[in-house]
Image: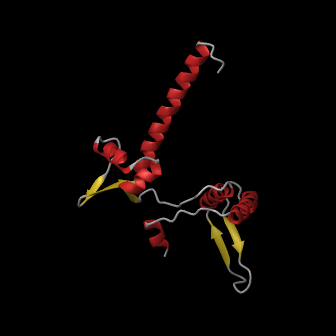
Amino acid sequence: MGAALLRRPETIVPSAQDASLALESSRVLSRHLSGENDLRFALPKPHEGETIVLPASAGRLLIEMLTQMAQGNPVMLMPLHAELTTQEAAEHLNVSRPYLVGLLEKGEIPFRKVGTHRRVMFSDLLSYKDKIDQARLESLDKLAEEAQKLDMGY
């Protein structure tokens, strides 16, 4: 089942009850996760005596996921090596599929073809997103600098 989940990740949209439970859980886990120490959970009856050990890195990821859920944000776990369809990639960037295909054809984002279908590596999509986010921040900094020079109250 786990492998199937990673092929087609499910987006979890937290209910109000989920968000409340996630908030409390993230607070408790945060108190117990320090540095590189693994998290250990003793299971209750009927599995008494069994222990679950989570690597510290998985604990940090779990806390981040719970924090996002506590804020009411939808979450999805996706491996960086996952390949996305053009529709999935467009949804992740919040653009139309034709716009995304244009980016692919211009060479802005690497892709490969499977038959007639394009596939985009999730890691490549994140790299592109980081690049455009950085460019956007630089443009905003320049605009703010110009506004200050012109004494526009910013």
Residue positioned most to the top: 150
Answer above or below: position of 146 versus 94.
Answer: above
Residue occupying the point 71% across, 82% down: 49
| Direction from residue 69 to residue 45 in the image, left or right | right
Nearest the eye: 126 or 117: 117
Residue occupying the point 69% across, 84% down: 47
Residue positioned most to the bottom: 46
The image shows residue 130 at horizontal and vertical percentages of 47, 41
Residue occupying the point 76% across, 58% down: 31
The image shows residue 110 at horizontal and vertical percentages of 33, 47
Image-quadrant location for residue 64: bottom right
| Direction from residue 91 to residue 110 in the image, left or right | left
The image shows residue 14 at horizontal and vertical percentages of 63, 62
Count the numbered circles shown.
0
The image shows residue 76 at horizontal and vertical percentages of 54, 60
Answer above or below: position of 132 versus 44.
Answer: above
Image-quadrant location for residue 36: bottom right
Image-quadrant location for residue 152: top right
| Direction from residue 4 to residue 140 in the image, left or right | right
Residue positioned most to the left: 115
Nearest the eye: 73 or 51: 73
Residue occupying the point 61% across, 63% down: 55
Which quadrant of the figure contains the C terminus? top right
Colour scheme = secondary structure
Nearest the eye: 62 or 115: 115
